Image (tube, coloured by chain):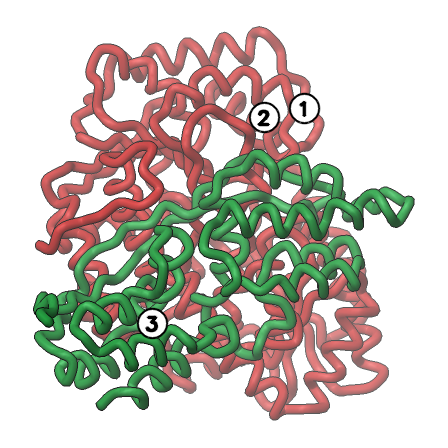
Chain colours: A green, B red
Amino acid sequence: MTHNLAPFAFHTERRLVVLTGRKARNLEELLAHLGEVSGSSIFYHTHHQYLAHHFETPVFHSDFSRWASLALLEEALAEKLAAIDLLAFSSIRQLREAIIATIGPYAKGNGRRQECMPGQEFHFSESKSFVMPSGIVAADIPDFFAKLPGVANTSIYFHFFEARLRLGRETNDFSAWLAYRGAEDLARAIDRLNPYRMSLDELRDRIARLGP
Amino acid sequence: MAVTLADYEKVVGPEVMDEIRTLAGYVRHKSLQNINSTPVGGGVAEILTRMIPLLRELGVDATWDVIKGNEAFYAVTKAFHNALHGHPETITPKMLEVFRENTAMNLEEMKLEGDVLFIHDPQPAGLIDKKPTIGRQWIWRCHIDVSNPDPAVWEFLRPWVERYDAAVFSMPDFAREMPIPQFRIAPSIDPLSDKNRDLEPEVVRGVLERFGIDPERPVLTQISRFDRLKDPLGVIESYRMVRRHCDCQLVLAGGGADDDPEGAEVLREVEEAAAKDPDIHVLLLPPFSDLEINALVRGSTIVFQKSIREGFGLTVSEGLWKGKPVIGGAVGGIRLQIINGVTGFLIHSPEGAANRAVELLSNPELCRKLGENGQRYVRENFLITRHVKDYLLLMLALDHPGERVVRLAGI
């Protein structure tokens, strides 16, 4: 059996936040926009907190959850939105549908039209990403694991979060490359890590510990 | 001595500077011409003064020009500024005509030479009329709060704004539904400016003593214009509540403006409210008092920014950067800078501010922890180096319109 011997080039990602000018004051308005905004916007509001530094573990990573809790005081909805398993989706379309399906009945069912206070509106944003080589290249599998500790969080984020869901790849880039190299067990072990349940530092450490 | 990239590297570390140098490599072939309405005074001039040399050192041909305008024009643009902030102003057809005439004069006289034209705020917005003739890439950078603008002024400006290639706002709340791309870029502070650089303890002490402030006792400070929206009387009210529990002094310091009759009235009310208390120091500082402001904040125990309405409120970051816990009104950009309970406290009333101040004065360890967090948070989010990085990305973004993911080759 032959394997692809291409090296792994770690990439990194920089981003600008794009403002859509769309805002919501209540769940009905949120739902209307959710059906129309770009997939990039859905990805941004469900993922950007994972890249940010946090002094404490955030109560909610999703902007939709946080807004439901803080601006609308809809705690149960916030919890339901936070419980959406991001790993279960292989496309933003599915994720968007799950969010809408969670909010929809809630908005109709509770019989009231809770409005946020002025100044607390939900502002839809998205990101414009710039992907560039980080300059770190792993020639082979041992080299990959040797270099991993020196790879920046933005790089880990790109190869794990962006690559899988936003760029529509089946798995994270590390697992895909290791599988090409014939290290299927390693690839599967990394694929089984849940990046939504740990910080980027922890994720890098966990991957590094799986190495040969 | 001129500040260099190497000086910033000592503050933010080599990784941040390497990233900025890499990004500069992608846009170095383009020149960047900034245009605003004033060479000194105000936040825009302050940031451009520091940013242009940095961009040039990075190899980006950045320049800065200022439009011309007479007194009548600036009276109109001041009214526009207030109206865009949502204050009631009477805008007459004559005022719109003055704006158009001044724009026409600058279109005639200004040399628009940059590959990228970075137009700051409404005053020079009409320069976009040159786009059909000269092409180029145009960015409108709006530094002011246009979340609730007077429709008359916004609708007057909108046809110009919508012809730019992109607009930039400081906060999501300021964005409008428009057919052009809009980016969020937060403003920043310069850690090496006189207002923010490290000071020797004896310099801080000297300034406090010069103003009659006791360096041995706790100090609460608010640095702001004497403006009702900054609620200086509410700060005095909070201070009086704090004094029932803890010993402390209060400093209210800010610049004055001769052309601001309301400011003079607010100052008089503040002085009246403070008159019988020798521990309240109302300081009307002359222009160019940055070092004094720096020392006053560094000599404080707690910084207040008890605004009722605020654009971005960079005085919060200036306090946090000096390792001070900041108690701020939960409005505008203050909400982006204070993580409640982590870098400071967000409050909604004089009582709330007083409660938090008593809590902090009783717990020096909490003060230290919030201050430490605040400094880190500002380092990551609100320093000029992040601002430079965002502007470089913006220049890059103009070359890739409509692309959500831009793939760049190594350089």
Q: Residue B89 got which mark? A: 1
Q: Amino acid at mark 1?
A: Glu
Q: Do the residues bearing badges 1 and 2 touch, measured as CB atoms within 8 Å?
A: yes
Q: Residues within 10 Å of mark 3 (few under 14, many from 20)?
A: some
Foreground residue among B369 and A48: A48
Element on which disc 1 rests: loop
Q: Position of residue B311 (x, y in %)?
A: 58, 47
The answer for which chain carries disc 3 is A
Is residue B38 visible from the viewing direction of this image?
yes
Q: Which residue is mark 3?
A: A153
* Camera-side mark, 3 or 1: 3
Mark 3 belongs to which amino acid? Asn
Pointer 3 and pointer 1 on the same chain: no
User: Tag 2, which secondary structure?
Assistant: helix
Give the spatial CA distance, label 2 vs label 3. 46 Å
Badge 1 and badge 2 both on one subunit: yes
Point out residue B34 in the picture as x, y percentages from the top left corner. Answer: 28, 36
